[in-house]
Image (spheres, rainbow, N blue to C red):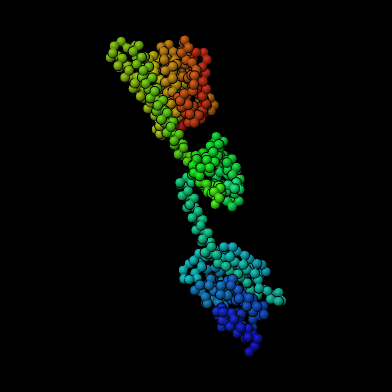
Amino acid sequence: MTPSSDWAGRLASRGGEMGRAIADHDWAATPLGPIEGWSTTLKAIVKLIIGSPVPQALLVGPNGILIYNAGYAQICGARHPAVLGTPVCEAWAEAAAFNRNVLDTVLAGATQTYSEQAFVLYRNGGPEDVWFDLSYSPIIEEDGERIGVHAIVVETTDRVRSQRELARSRERLAFALNSAGMIGTWDWHIGSNLFFPDTRLAELFVSDVVSPEDGMPVERYLEAIHPEDLPRVQAAFREAIAEKDKYSEEYRLRGRDGSWRWVIARGECLYNHAGRPARFPGAIVDITELKESEEARSILLRELNHRVKNIFAVVSGLVSMTARTATTPRDMAEALRGRLAALSAAHDLIRSAVLGTEAGQETTPLADLVRRILAPHVEQDDRVSVSGPAILLGPTAATSLALVFHELATNAAKYGALSGEAGTLRVEWVITAADVALTWAEQAPGGLVSAPSHRGFGSQLIEMSVQRQLKGALTHDWSGGGLTAMLVVPADHLAR
């Protein structure tokens, strides 16, 4: 028996199943020739990979004849043992271009590594999406000749699929949390004073993103709480710890983009075996939309109360004004019905502004809108002057301006120029380069018009309409026994 045949025998007896498969294979039918003729270098590296638990393969010669260990055989699936001793590009036809590039590159002297390299392989009949960590280096003979490629092949399919499923789970969780308004969770370690926000909370509300593992001083988080709310939040924390009670508090939190969000935070202090406070975990939910809805309802209720009070005052004024000129009860009834109908029409104009509903799509001439708003309050046309160039108002601008003029007209009828017989009102507007300037000027002999002693809800409504909807500015001048209100609105906002 020759030393070479001794080597094959030892490979068969000591190399396990793959050792026997390699020793028994008909290598004479391959470009490598009989196993007895293999070089010392090739035999040594075959022995090395056979004893390794790491999946490895040798791609020998210019065509990469496959020799591999048991770990690689498992990767081959149903293709083993048929691919043993075959060119790698034939063994893995679906990855032929990739393997050809590896052979050409590494046989030229380079090394190659790949992390989570994706393939679609047909190793068990059907297509499989698989991933591998791969490392390729040349097999070099003692004389320096590169005779093949040593491949370390670690399948990472399960890891990649797990990572992707984890990412999908996180996406689904994030979607669920977003839908529920959930911002994130925290864990305050009271002894070390370290505050551990989860990644979501840190990214949204902490100035510098903090690793959940590192934590930060709790003061860093408290800095994001609105200064008006901070004392109340701190007091609630202290009370929950002292009373061993659950913590629940609503406050404003500043996001990394500078915006303020209303949140509700809930948590509970945990105590150590000695009864001392140890940790304070909790969660935060975004309630901004709820708060805005509550504020809108509050404004609507205040507006309703304001309107009811005004309607009684206006109707009382209409009755008095009509009674001064009516000659018979029938004349008074007809005149009063007409003015009440005009008042109803004026209220229709402001309905969408008050209720926050969408206005229609029609345009409204500014002059017509002013006259319709004033009609219930005016008995003689010569007391009121309305002038200005033709301007068509879009539906949003029409409802906002109707609300403004309605408030001004109501106040004029209750306290100002239209509350007596001698007062006058001038409404006019001019167009500048980019704006429209409107003037509401009341004059009442005897000082009937005076500055209000306090800022009422009607004034707040006017300011909200001008500033929020019309993006304009409003000023008042109470000098000279009258009121002059100046309203400046961007011209493009009047078309909306």
Q: Nearer the viewer, residue 111 or 275?
A: 275
* Quarter of the view holding residue 51: bottom right
In the displayed structure, would residue 259 be above or below residue 458? below
Residue occupying the far left of the picture:
330
Q: Position of residue 265 (x, y in %)?
A: 50, 43
Q: Nearer the viewer, residue 467 or 493?
A: 467
In the displayed structure, would residue 375 be above or below residue 75? above
Q: How many dots with numbers? A: 0
Q: Is residue 413 left or right of residue 66?
A: left
In the displayed structure, would residue 158 be above or below residue 171? below
Quarter containing the N terminus: bottom right
Write the residue at 53% across / 28% down. 434
Residue occupying the far right of the picture:
143
Q: Position of residue 362 (x, y in %)?
A: 40, 31
Write the residue at 48% across / 29% down. 464
In this rendering, does residue 491 appear at all?
Answer: no
In this rendering, does residue 205 appear at all?
Answer: yes
Q: Position of residue 212 (x, y in %)?
A: 57, 51
Write the residue at 52% across / 15% down. 479
Residue occupying the far front of the picture:
274
Q: Nearer the viewer, residue 40 or 310?
A: 310
Q: Position of residue 129 (x, y in %)?
A: 50, 64
* Quarter of the view holding residue 47: bottom right
Q: Nearer the viewer, residue 219 or 88?
A: 219
Write the residue at 50% across / 13% down. 481
